[in-house]
Image (cartoon, rainbow, N blue to C red):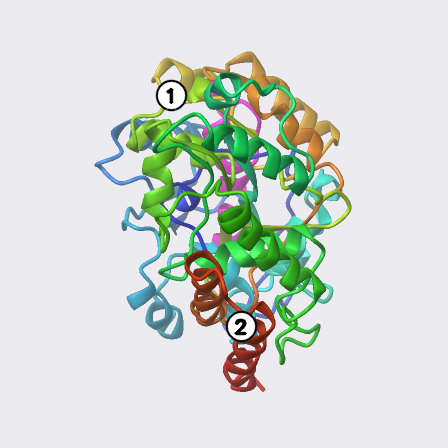
Amino acid sequence: MRRSGYRRTVGLLLVAGLGLTASACGSDGKNEAQGSADPNAPVTITVGCQPPKSNAKEREAWDADVAEFKKLHPNITIESKDAFPCINPDTFQAKLAGGSVEDVFYVYYTDVQKIVANKQAADISEYVGQVKGLKDLRPDVLSVFQDGDKTYGLPRSNYSTGLVYNRKLFTQAGLDPNEPPKTWAEVHAAAKKIAGLGSGYVGFGEYSAGNTGGWHFAASLYGRGGEMVSSDGKTAAFNSPEGKAVLENLKQMRWNDNSMGTKQLLQWEDLMRMMGAGKLGMMIGAPDVVQTVNNDFQGKFEDYGVTALPESDGKFSLSGGDGYMFNAKATPEKIRAGLLWLEFHELTPGKGQFNYERAKAQGRPVGLPIPDLYGKTAPGNEIAALRKKHATIPVEHFTPYVEGNANVVSKLEPPKAQELYAILDVAMSAVLTRQDADIDKLLADAESKANKVLDKLS
């Protein structure tokens, strides 16, 4: 689940020198490895998720990249599609079923496995086997587009949740903004000091309505090493010591520490507005929350920092992102051309989405430490160096996030995520609005309802 900034593309990482060999893909989505396509034959491909006209700077950059790509590959014509949003949930499944998606179509991580199961995308295993640098991709990220030994797409961005905090408020409260909390006990202590700054200040904010409460429950649960569902995805697994700890933690901050404020039942925009107004000390979120707060809620990049989720070292972080897959009906020529485009625009340092010099000249923010597709490999280090060289925001404010997530494994949203989140909204809202809330009963009730939802998958 992503809200506004979470849905935005905030940066991409590279695979250096993408080498391709030609092979064929049948309409059933299975690669037939014919390998006879002429690499110089004229071919036209449609590509999704061109920035809309309302996003003038990014669209200008995209169009310039299409023109540059044409010079490099005169035989390939890119027809860009600018539907906004890039995926409309009301029509996406119908387009997939009818085979009317673009030749190279944009997809969220959470849709990939369903698309694969329905054979609505091409198996490109024979192609990506020739990609130089593929071994440098983080296994947890690449695996999103894999099913067994087959590959169906490439990632272009990813995010993982951490702890967003207001550095300015930390300083005002006598806290060191360069040493953000590493444990939940430290979060409690910091939140109490920030709430003590005066009326209207909230130390730690949390969602509990509109499915956002369940979303953040999952994020906190993963950070503690817990699971939302069983390994086979058929039963709920959140009624556990880790799940109980999530709610106990919030209950203590809300009622014992008085550091979460009295206004609850908050949804996405509420915490963003509070953070932008300089009244909120901490919240769970990815680094692009800072961009959203800066762009849409009158915040300033320099006032914020991000660190890893407390106590998540060696555990999990709720993640998500996007990438591209190929129309199951695409010809070998189209697949080859599409991979060349993705190489150029999504995966090459200094080009396309990684042209940080151009982004800086356009006045766009540069420096957010996401996506992290490669970790500390050579490609990842090269991207980090380019990002730092052309940074327009304080890169050092995100160092705790980068270092703290070094040993954290990204974990996708559970099946039937929105239904489960809605169920867990009830538990989240209860502990934040009722001091006598029975956590064991809340989790048991949620588990029963979740099992009925998951049973439909069997």
Residue at 71% over, 64% down: 241
Picture quadrant of residue 265: bottom left
Q: Earlier in the sequence, mark 2 or mark 1?
A: 1
In the depicted structure, whether residue 371 falls above or below residue 82: above
Callout 1: few (<14), some (14-19), or many (20+) C-alpha neighbours within 10 Å?
A: some
Give the percent coordinates (x, y) of residue 365.
Answer: 41, 22
**Dividing the picture into quarters, in which one does residue 23 lie?**
bottom right
Q: Which mark is residue 442?
A: 2
Nearest the viewer among 269 and 147 is 269
Q: CA distance from mark 2 to mark 1?
A: 39 Å
On the rendered structure, is 34 left or right of 71? right
Q: Secondary structure at mark 1?
A: loop
Q: Amino acid at mark 2?
A: Leu
User: Could you say which disc has been placed on residue 300 in the image?
Assistant: 1
- The one nearer the camera, 412 or 25, is 412
Q: Which quarter of the figure is the N terminus placed in?
A: bottom left
User: Disc 1 residue type?
Assistant: Lys
Residue 447: horizontal and vertical position, in percent?
Answer: 57, 77
Q: Is residue 349 magenta?
A: yes
Asked where in the image residue 74 lies, by quadrant, the reply is: top left
Q: Position of residue 442 (x, y in %)?
A: 53, 72
- Can residue 113 be seen from the camera position used here? yes
Secondary structure mainly formed by the magenta segment: helix
Q: Nearer the viewer, mark 2 or mark 1?
A: 2
Highlighted range, magenta: 332-356
Q: Where in the figure is residue 21, as x and y percent of width and height? A: 65, 48
Residue at the outermost left position: 54
